[in-house]
Image (tube, helix red, strand yellow):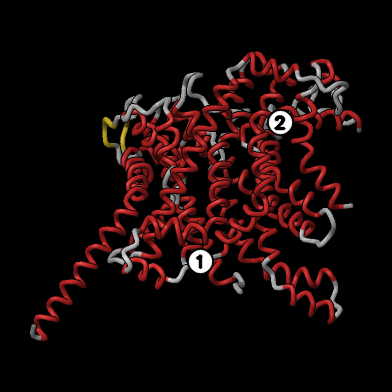
Amino acid sequence: MTTIQHELADRHVERKRAWSNWATGMLFLLPSLLLFGVFLFYPMVRTVYLSLFLTDSQGVPIVFVGWENFLNLFQSTSFQISAKATALFVLYTVPAGIVLATALAILANQKLRGIGLFRTMFSATMGMSVAASSVIWMFLFNPSIGLFNRILAALNIPGVQWLLDPQYALLSVSIATIWMNTGFAFLILLGGLQNIDQSLYESARIAGVSESYKLRKITLPMLSPTLFFVTTVSLINAFQTFGQIDLLTKGGPMESTNVIVYSIYKDAFINYNVGSASAQAVLLFVAVLVVTVLQFKIGERKVHYQ
Amino acid sequence: MTLTVSGLVMVFPILYAFLISFMQGGEVLQGSLWPETFSLANFVSAFDRVPLLTYLWNSLMVSVLIMAGQLVLCSLAAFAFVFVEFKGREWIFYLFISTMMIPWEATMVPNFQTVQSLGWLNSYAGLTIPFFAMAFGTFLLRQQFKTIPKELYEASQIAGISKLRFFTGVVLPVVKTTMTTLAIYSFLTAWNMYLWPLLVTNNEANRTVQIGLKQMQTQEIASDWGVVMAGVVMVILPTLILLFAGQKRLQEGLTQGALK
């Protein structure tokens, strides 16, 4: 064979290999791509589409109405209450939840005998379903036999209608939610703490600096990538809250706990107003997207990476 | 001291649920913290008044199916991302990343319609298949697969060893711990699912145990807190045991997923 023939043969083999690699790669990725396509990308596009239509009770689009669903939403008091409830819920649960989980993680990162038991205790809520946790908190909040009002009664303070009073309902649900989410955040933050280079603390010990100095100058900066991740996940989770609302308050009283996902659910599956539900779903999508993008932008600049 | 107090406060609601599940009706109303006798009557009653066994079985099936489906699909995808080089791979990787920005709840209305039109309402298929693909799991496994030298894969290809044998013989032993972590995580998440099963099941034969709890809470049993808590205990026992057994592993795996 001449060199040209060799080269052609080589190129042929090369192309065949590239093709075979492509086929293999696609074959392996196909199941995931197919499911993402059918159950994530298509429905997302479809949601945007439906948000621009008036639909019948089955969710079949009838008339194109453009931005009307969105305009109606922004003008409806019900949606304004829901947006406010969602924002407040995020505000109540995310910062407090992260502070609590960080404190617990720092406590549980000590080298003590039997510390494993405490780590197990702190992470326990990760094994608890939203439904089970909600039922337990429903009991704790019970106005006549629940623990909280019993404590208040023992202190001679009049009882509170935790879940029935519009003033307290969102706060009550938030407290329950903080408890539910602690296990997960704790586990990740503990992992982050354990990844910190121990020699830093060794040097600090030799230098004889105070505990609070160590916390501010070593622990928190070194933990910041983990804190950043936990914050993002907690924010997104807070936007997606549903179960505890459905079980504890059903969005009430007076819509004070009608957070966005519960509102979408009610509009779509109880009031059969799919257009409005879709418009709210689009807004939820945008909110999550903004959070993610913002976190990445801020995170890239501010967070200390090792 | 701080440790003990905070530990007790955190587990108190769980502990309390266990204690109440053993109490007689009167004791609950009096607000006792410790049952006089540890009676199993509430458990008998819970299984008697709602088809708890069916619900537990359904939840087990759904969780195992989702776990298996996710492990298979994530392994396949991660394998392609690490070992098979081809044009457009990068692009598909970004597509996977973008899935993490779509909140699942924003897509639930069309998803419900899809599952309905496929005739998958009240079926394991409808409860599980939509969750088989998972970007987080794929990334987690990808990180682990990357620790295996590519030359090893190329050599095995030249030696004519099948991809499946390379996977079971070389890859699997290396990533066993990460696989276990992912399996625990998948099972926990699937067992605890609430909104989707609420949408796609509407009869007792196909309900999962989480929806069973909602049913218990809304029926007349609701005032019988001992029985309701017995139901709660049955629901949380499997996941708590799984969590306690796999806590360390889960922590390591999740941290890895979070940071890399």
Residue B230 image offset from top left, x and y in percent: 71, 24
Position above or below: A256 against A114: above
Residue A150 is at least partly visible in this image? yes
Determine the residue positioned at 79% across, 50% down: A118
Query: Dot 1: few (<14), some (14–19), or many (≥20) neighbours within 10 Å?
Result: few
Q: Are marks 2 and 1 in contact (CB under 8 Å)?
A: no
Of the numbered discs 2 and 1, the one sitting upstream in the chain is 2
Position above or below: A65 against B29: below
Structural distance between the alpha carbons of marks 2 and 1 = 39 Å
Of B121 and B77, the residue lying toward us: B77
B130 displayed left or right of B251:
left
Residue B86 image offset from top left, x and y in percent: 29, 66
Mark 1 belongs to which amino acid?
Lys
Determine the residue positioned at 55% across, 59% down: B257
B162 displayed left or right of B194:
left
Instruction: Point out the frontmost of discs 2 and 1.
Output: 2
Q: Which residue is mark 1?
A: A297
Q: Which mark is residue A110?
A: none
Residue A217 image offset from top left, x and y in percent: 74, 73
Position above or below: A42 against A197: above
Residue B99 image offset from top left, x and y in percent: 42, 52
Residue B90 is at least partly visible in this image? no
Determine the residue positioned at 36% across, 36% down: B110
The quadrant the C terminus of chain B occupies is: bottom right
Q: Secondary structure at mark 2?
A: helix
Q: Quadrant of residue B192?
A: top right
Of A64 and B182, the residue lying toward us: B182
Q: Which residue is mark 2?
A: A136
Chain at numbered mark 1: A
